[in-house]
Image (cartoon, coloured by chain):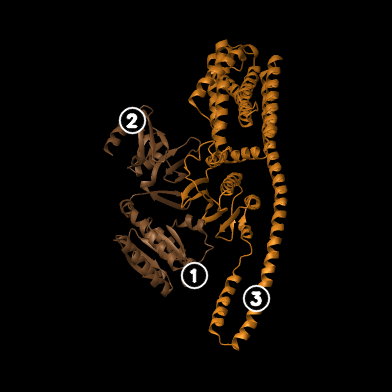
Chain colours: A orange, B brown
Amino acid sequence: MVYIDWNLSLVNNFAILFLMLQLTHYFLKEFKPLYILTDILGALIFAYIGLFIDDIFILLFVGFILAMQLALAKNHKLDLKAAISLVMAANLQLIISSLATYIARILLFISSGQWRLRTLEKYQNIFIGLTVIVTVMLALVFIIVVSQFRDRITQTRLQIEHYHLGKRVFMISLSVFISLIVIMTISDFQEVTATIQAALIIIFTILIGFTYWQVTFFIKTFALQTEAKEKIERNEQLNNYLTLVQKQYTELRKFKHDFQNIMLSLNQVLEDNDSKQLKYYYSALLSEEKDLNSVQNGRITQIQAIDNDAIRGLLIQKFFSAKARDVNINFELDQKHYKIKPNISIVRALGILLDNAIEHVQNSEDKTVTCAFLKTGKTLEITVDNKINEDVNLNQIFDCGFSTKKNHTGFGLTNVKELVDHSEDLFLDSKIIHNHLMMTLIVLGSE
Amino acid sequence: MFPVFLLEDNDIQRQHYKTFINNGIMINDAPMELKKAVATTEDLFTDPLPEQGLFFLDMEINSNKMAGLEAATKIRHQVPLAQIVFITTHDELSIVTLERRIAPLDYILKDKGFDDIKERINNDIQSVQLNIEKYTHYSQNLFGYKIGERYFSIIMDDVIMLLTEKSAPGKVTLIAKNQRAEFIGSLNALEEQYTNLFRCDRSYLVNLENINSFDSSKKELSFIDGSTCKVSFRKTKELTEKIKKL
């Protein structure tokens, strides 16, 4: 064991806790000036406690923050997003600071040329300083590496939320964290040599890596499974509808056939008759026939052009749920093929926009919602349009909790904004024109 | 004189609309003139288009159902502030798509009869007349932004403010009269490009033409649409001077 002066280990403990909190903020993308103050205070208190109880203080600290979150939450339910971020940050910080300790140790050995623990005690000022610096540097390297995968991480996070997997992921990270602490504490207690502890921690790090990899794999599988199940249901609904449309279309064709027959026989009658009026009506009817030819076999069937199961499924589902509320969704598609990259944010944002529009028109006279897909090169615009009767202040509707309806929470648009903010290739454009509210989701990079 | 254009392939209808337009200009005593009444798209583009104009376009020209739309796209490209009115029989119009692509001033449906068309043409002339000064003044002064392959422009007069939010790094939010949009950009670059806009805070670039009031104790600017923004301490003096000049 290396004996370190108490104020130096206070600095080390403080650095560990403070960095851990900063990592948590980074995961949550929440930085406020006030946080720095509370972070410093909390980290100082627990760093002091850490002087007496070794590595367990990190566990205590995490437990304390979780307990605080639980106590401060409105319905005493844990905010899983915050909790997972904290535990993940704690795991990372543990690994990073252990690694940093070893790196600092090796650096010191090399520079002094003496491979003895004594050296560490002799130069403990430098040793601790070096450890802290290496810790910060490792954390920075980690952040730089992770920011390359930001999109993928956001997608995974959204999937966790979408499929309500938060609790499981939290439990997994928490148990990994506790085991890590247990290993470190026991090895300290038993005065295991540094080499063995290093080996233990390296093995454990690999295990953690595997666990997280396994978790993302599990989430993916789960998502695929759920999607497949939803797809079957959607296809069933669509097939039922298409059969119905087909039936109506057949009836229409039958009528057209009869109509043509009647017209033919009428033609015969006309030849034997020279009433001008009759001839006029006949020609009028003839021109109607053209229109009959252009009767479209169901507007909803055109959404087959959308080459994205989740979005098509959502549109079909909303089309029917709107129908049930007497609202008609009118689709405008000007292309035969829309390839849209799978992106859960689009599905969620579009779902909210459609829900808002349907809800808005269902009590008004004009119960129509229009959903248009417009493509310019690789830029896709999905517009949801509905008529509005009262004056709506566009900037107000983006405020959290604002809703044009009483007894309604109105968090929808805030969620859309958050989803759009989080992705680099989504943009939201809202416009009020000719008494219509047009909400457009612009998606970049669809082919 | 503010030029008016008409594109309609049917001779009888074109004759009718010509009369309606000329009458509309006369009744309203509008400073406009019907410059061209043509039957084909090619004829419309024989001469270069002016910087502004009111265009009445038939959607279907010589059985090409997209002709009107194609012409409108071309007009919009050359004359960003053009006022475009579609006259069409096709009632299954994709209105939202048209709105996004062209943002026309109006749609007139032919099936409602000549009286209705006459009235609508008259209304459109009136509404353009009301804004003629605005179009002339702002024809050079547009705010433009790009998202992917789409280029959007709005009249500078409609811009209220541009802002950045920490939650959306790299994106700029545009708040305008009746519109809110976002695009990739930086306030520093925009401040340089549009010198009429005032940087009142690190994350706000505002159009002082549209302010309602300035609360100097709260350091808060409020705008005609009810939105507000903070003013940084450093900029307060410069702002009060600018407001005095307005």
Quarter of the figure that contains the C terminus of chain B: top left
Marks 1 and 2 belong to one chain:
yes
Give the quadrant of residue B243: top left
Three-letter code, disc 3: Phe
Quarter of the figure that contains the N terminus of chain B: bottom left
Task: Say which residue label 2 marks.
Answer: B236
Residue B16 location (% of width, % of height):
39, 71
Residue B154 location (% of width, % of height):
40, 50
Crowd band around label 1 with a 10 angstrom C-alpha radius: few (<14), some (14–19), many (20+): few
Task: Say which residue label 1 marks.
Answer: B64
Cα distance, mark 3 to mark 1? 28 Å
Residue A365 versus residue B61: which sits nearer the camera?
A365
Cα distance, mark 2 to mark 3? 78 Å
The chain letter under disc 1 is B
Task: Describe residue B83's horizontal placement relative to residue A186 as left or right.
Answer: left
Judge whether A192 appears above or below A356 on screen: above
The chain letter under disc 3 is A
Three-letter code, disc 1: Asn
Marks 3 and 1 belong to one chain:
no
Residue for point 59% across, 69% down: A294
Q: Give the label on residue A259, or none.
A: 3
Q: Does the rendering let one see residue A295?
A: yes
Crowd band around label 3 with a 10 angstrom C-alpha radius: few (<14), some (14–19), many (20+): few
Question: Which structural element holds mark 3?
Answer: helix
Residue B222 location (% of width, % of height):
39, 36
Question: Which structural element holds mark 2?
Answer: helix
The chain letter under disc 2 is B
Label located before the other in sequence (1 or 2): 1
Contact between labelled residues 1 and 3, with CB atoms less than 8 Å apart: no
